[in-house]
Amino acid sequence: VDAENGGWVSSRGPARRPGDGHDPAAGEAVPVDGTKSAYAHAFVVLAAASGTIAGREGARELLDAALAVLDERFWEPGPRMHADEWSRDWTVLDEYRGVNANMHSVEALLAAHDATGDPEWLARAASVADRVVGWARENDWRIPEHFDAGWNPLPDYNADRPRDPFKPYGSTPGHGLEWARLLLQVDVAAGTPGARTDAAVALFDRAVADGWDGEHGGGFVYTVDWSGTPVEPRRYHWVAAEAVAAADVLGRVTGDPRFAEAAAGWWEWIDEHLVDHERGSWHHELDTANRPDGVTWVGKPDVYHAAQAVILPDLPLTGSLAASAKAAGSILG
């Protein structure tokens, strides 16, 4: 948290020692990235909403504070989308607009709706999702990720940075898979079964057609260009995790056995190539021969996608993972 300016900085580093030339008091972590991003704030909302659903002390107060910042600083009522990034002191708003931060905002707002019952958070999640579906439908179901301040697409953005971990050039099949799942969770939360199923299937099928590299031992490529040709062919663990999660949810909603069959095959590939049976967790990045690599992701910095992929199939489907876990406990209890 940024006690001076409000909100949350994007990342903090190790605590500083006295006399090392830094201003913060001994033991205080200092910002590594002091910008204020919608992406980071969405995860604060998600964590606080999940804590609220779980009944953790202080979580609701944190949720209310995080939602207030997301609403006041990032939500743009005209386009009904979230802006991307402010300077640390909230004086400069970057002109860039992006779908990635909005995707995670949808996930966070669905959890906030489950935690609070406030219909506004669900309405915002649904409107963002539907706007993205519209862009994808007009683009052969490849989602444009990058926009200017007027929400005009920037198809060549970061063409010189194909491995950017958050804003790569081109279409990202993993995000198509992630959106497919989120659309169905929006429908469950809104009580509109089937409203977004066709779009979810279209996003899923496009992502699989573009992303799965069956000619080179399997695995999902990171990015493709606007004709579906791979740009960054390395395999990132989170894409495979989102693939099996999306397939599980689509299988349950549609009843079509092809989704379960796809998930079963991908789980075999995950077990063979991504799961680190010696040291635990999953390898975060593989090269094009499916060997552990670390060009973009060094080490194992998170278990977020992998954990969700493992847990989700055992839970009832709701708007959020936390609500699903609570519902499972109620059913079992």
Image (cartoon, rainbow, N blue to C red):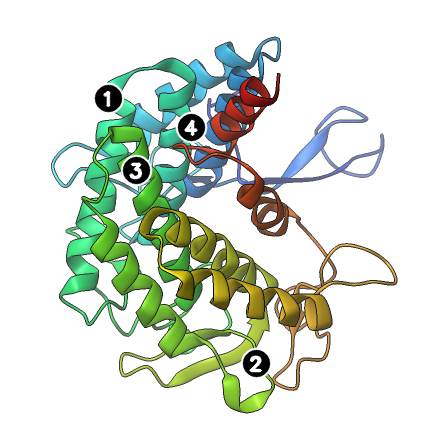
For marks 4 and 3 on the same chain, the one whose residue lies earlier in the sequence: 4
Q: Which residue is mark 2?
A: 218
Q: CA distance from mark 2 to mark 1?
A: 42 Å
Judge depth for marks 3 and 1 and give the one in front. Answer: 3
Q: Residue at x 71, y 64 (%)?
A: 298
Residue 127, image x and y in percent? Answer: 19, 38
What SS does tag 1 mark?
Answer: helix
For the residue marked with disc 4, what is the amino acid? Answer: Ala
Q: Which residue is mark 4?
A: 111
Q: CA distance from mark 2 to mark 4?
A: 33 Å
| Circles 3, 2 touching at the beta carbon (< 8 Å) | no
For marks 1 and 4 on the same chain, the one whose residue lies earlier in the sequence: 4
Q: CA distance from mark 4 to mark 3?
A: 11 Å
In the rendered image, the vertical position of residue 153 relative to residue 59, given as above or below: below
Q: CA distance from mark 3 to mark 2?
A: 31 Å
Judge depth for marks 4 and 3 and give the one in front. Answer: 3
Judge the density around disc 4: few (<14), some (14-19), many (≥20) Cα neighbours within 10 Å. many
Specify whether residue 159 is in view.
no
For the residue marked with disc 2, what is the amino acid? Answer: Gly
Q: Which quadrant of the rendered structure holds the N terminus?
A: top right
Residue 18, image x and y in percent? Answer: 85, 30
Judge depth for marks 2 and 1 and give the one in front. Answer: 2
Q: CA distance from mark 3 to mark 1?
A: 13 Å
For the residue marked with disc 1, what is the amino acid? Answer: Glu
For the residue marked with disc 3, what is the amino acid? Answer: Val
Q: CA distance from mark 1 to mark 4?
A: 12 Å
What SS does tag 2 mark?
Answer: loop
Q: Which quadrant of the rendered structure holds the C terminus?
A: top right
What SS does tag 3 mark?
Answer: helix
Q: Which residue is mark 3?
A: 186
